Amino acid sequence: MNSTRPLLLVSLALGALALGGCGKSEPSASGSAAAPSAPAAAATPAPAANAFPGMEADLQRTLKEQASFYHFKTPADLAKDTQGLTWEDGSDEAEFADPAAKKGGTLNEYIPDFPGTFRTMGPDASASFRQFILDYVAPAFTAPNPNLPGREMPQLATSWAFDPAHKTVYFRLDPAARWSDGVPFTTDDVVFTWYYYRSPLINDPWMNDFYAKTYDGITIYDAHTFSVTLKDLRPDSIDRAGNINPYPKHFFKDFGPDWVKTYNWRICPTLGAYTILEEDIKRPSSITLTHVKDWWAENRRFMRGRFNPDRIHLAVIRDPDKAFEAFVRGDLDIFPLQNPQLWYGKLPDNHPSVTSGFTVKARFYNQIPPPNFALWLNEAMPLLGNRDVRLGIHHATNFALVCQQYFRGDATIQKTTADGYGWDINPAVTPRPFDPAKARAYFAKAGFTTQGPDGVLVDKDGHRLSFTITTTYKRYTDVLVILKQEALKAGLEYNIEVLDETTGWQKTQQKKHEITLAALSRSVEMYPRYWEMYSGENAYDVPYLPDGSPNPARKIKPNTNNFSSLAIPELDQLIKQYDKTETMEQVKILAAKIEQIIYDDASWVNGWKLPFYRVGYRPWIKWPKNFDPMQSRDTEEFWTMWIDQDEQKATLEAKAAGRSLPVQILSYDHYRQP
């Protein structure tokens, strides 16, 4: 998930977004690119299907009508526009992959369901499969260096220059870049990409809004040189301009009002290492990705040594338990073991698959913003609008026991909603401790003073202090059981509702939950986002009256990430300032104030975080010296592993003969923090 994508619910199906996430989450993102407050018209209204003139004609119409956005100049103009600027190319920074990695072989993994579309934009395009064809494999113009926070590395662009005075970033594209169907990549595709992202026809309002509010224009100088001008100067301006995945103009010749249906199963050419071949689509059982032949970026800096397998076979296994069994059996080559029930329970160190050497267990300490697992209290629901009730819930919720008991002491409680960004967001904010006596005192202020025969507090009207926690994480049912048992000590009843991912996600986004156990994917960004989750404008249609007081006629805004239905005028104003700050010093000052208000409001009950991800794999899967980049969230994010086919053959022969191999239980501590 890069900075041009909304935050997505963390999925547990694959390791990808579960350990920290697009959705997922999860997803993407290298800027605090919070969606602006109100949808902006990215282009003129979409014409009716029978009036649409065709993609090329509509593109030309758009370029003419939006001439203030799309600019076309000459190479001579480029020399003048960039005079005095410094061009960078990342050549003085160390690579994180192993250039000596071996190529070839097939990597066997799984996905929880057959994808509902091959589109990467529009409805249903944000499922976990997207990471295999876009988020983790398709290059952007530039991308954040995962070992050097705040620095960019080349991808499609060989070099770039930043003009802060004019909020403009210039890019020189690699002239060798080719789409997987052999068509050269040029600035024609750059122009189409902005047209595509800004078009209301894509049926993706978040994207329309982001691209309308973030960018002030693009300028084309020649087939391989262009610039991006931002509306606002931000600390991560280069990344906001460069971390964008382009789309091929020639592929979208049939783009129009019916494109969602027309392109649902079309395989889009890619600039990345892997594509889908028609013969490898086996509905509904599997799908296989094939390495692009003679891939243009094979030997490019920061690309070499990555994307090494020839093929990635993704078996569809809907039941996570059956997927784990398939891994132990040997049908899958790699499997996320983040869940302590897997690492300690189902695959302990003395498991035959481990002691025989057939399975390697590895723990990799990374440095990332963790997914913000928490209880999100929906203030639009009865009782939860009462701050005393919310404060009581904080003290009645024993996440400390969850960390110790369920996570075997590996996890700690998150301090703020934005841990993991390299600085203490607000030193004054600390998790409220589990304290049944304090919880009961707050509940008494809210009128819950009498304890019923079942141990649950009731008010004078007989209303029970009872709430339902909704979640999509079946694997975390035991977490909720612990919370339920402990909450009763404070007179609070938690009911547990575990739904499938689609149903649970919809219920939460529709704000029909009371409390949800959820997390949004945390892309590795310079600083946190707040607008999506905490702005009142992302919770209600008209949240406030002109005097700033709550609007009694306001209506819930569905399909947003403001899970708590939070609407605080002071907070909204701070977030607006935050989303226009130009320096990290200003970002830190405002983030501290924002976190204080969120903490005081108490609608976010601090969940857990882990300082690593864990994985099991076959001994023929190899990794660079330090395993993965510092800011990687899972094994697929940067594709640094490779297959040693000679060792694969020897391992399988030893297994067939009943011979054991050396036991490997590894811990990669290079990036471990004290």
Image (cartoon, helix red, strand yellow):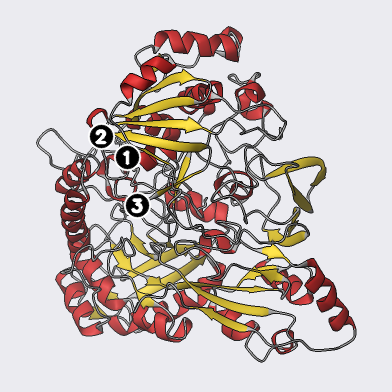
Q: Split into 4 quadrants, where in the image is the C terminus?
A: bottom left
Q: What distance separates the C-alpha of mark 1 from that of mark 2?
A: 8 Å
Residue at the image point whose x is 73% and y is 68% from the top: 333
Which residue sits furthest right? 657
Q: Is residue 489 left or right of residue 299?
A: left
Q: Is residue 271 left or right of residue 423?
A: right
Structural crowding at the residue carrying mark 3, measured as other residues with C-alpha within 10 Å and reported as few (<14), some (14–19) or many (≥20): some
Residue behind mark 3: 150
Comparing 649 with 331, the one in front is: 649
Where residue 294 appears, as percent x and y from the top left, is 73, 41
Q: Is residue 198 visible?
A: yes
- Please name the residue shown 56% across and 8% down the image: 57
Apparent side of residue 282 relative to residue 3 in the rendered image (left or right): right
Q: What element carries label 1?
A: helix
Which residue in the structure is indicated by mark 1?
A: 237
Q: In the rendered structure, are the residues bearing label 3 and label 1 in contact, judged by CB atoms less than 8 Å apart?
A: no
Which tag is nearer the camera, tag 1 or tag 2? 2
Percent x, y for residue 257?
58, 19
Residue denoted by label 2:
164
Disc 3 to disc 1, C-alpha distance: 10 Å
Q: Residues within 10 Å of mark 2 (few under 14, many from 20)?
A: some
- Sequence-earlier tag: 3 or 1: 3
SS for dot 3: loop
Question: Residue at the bottom extreme?
Answer: 350
Mark closer to the chain start, 3 or 2:
3
Residue type pointed to by label 3: Gly
Tag 2: amino acid: Pro
Q: In this view, does 363 lie above or below 425?
A: below
Q: Image quarter for residue 429?
A: bottom left
Above or below, 667 against 141 in this view is: below
